[in-house]
Image (spheres, grey):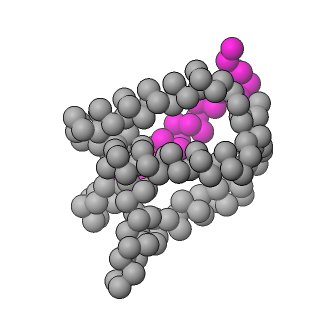
Amino acid sequence: MIDWSSFTPWTSLTGGALIGGAVALLWLANGRIAGISGICAGLMTNLSQLQWWRLAFVAGLVAAPVCWQLVAPLPEIRLQASPGGLAVAGLVVGIGVQLGSGCTSGHGICGMARLSKRSVVATLIFMGMAMLTVLVLGNAGVAP
């Protein structure tokens, strides 16, 4: 059942355009793909040379909801999962990122836009596993 009162096509379209613009800008300015896991990993592994573009990108990710809150209220976040469950979920996602050589932003947004076969396969696997997880666990841990 679709909750039509929560359907937000204009804010979703705006968010998608902003993501696409940021991805294109990073590609044009630095020749880099905006894979968030790779950007964050680079911040933690290349400590000898600070790469300002990585820091600026992550700062933008953190600042975006703060800026949005000036315009509209943020949605309420309610988690019904235990801290242990969240830790296991994070570990599983981290392993998937390593096995897939990237995350959903790198493969699903940037790789798909470049028509990368590897990214198409990775994105299909990400989505298939997400659907399987919902099928097996249902809405466990997700608040309405």
Relative placement, left or right, of 44 versus 116 is: right
Residue 18 can be seen, yes or no? no
* Quadrant of the snapshot with the C terminus: top right
Residue 117 can be seen, yes or no? yes
Image spot of residue 102 (x, y percent): 35, 49
Q: What residue is drawn where x is 31% and y is 55%?
A: 33
Q: Is residue 56 above or below residue 127?
A: below
- On the image, which quarter does residue 115 sit in? top left
Q: What residue is drawn where x is 37% and y is 69%?
A: 42
Marks counted in the figure total 0
Q: Is residue 42 above or below residue 70?
A: below
- On the image, which quarter does residue 68 sit in? bottom right
Q: Nearer the viewer, residue 124 or 24?
A: 124
Highlighted magenta segment, given as a residue range? 1-24
In the orientation shown, which residue stands out farthest toward the bottom?
Answer: 48
Q: Nearer the viewer, residue 62 or 15?
A: 62
- On the image, which quarter does residue 133 sit in? top right
* Quadrant of the snapshot with the N terminus: top right
Image spot of residue 77 (x, y percent): 75, 45
Image spot of residue 59 (x, y percent): 53, 68
Main SS, magenta residues: helix
Relative placement, left or right, of 42 versus 141 is: left
User: Is 117 one of the magenta-colored residues?
Assistant: no
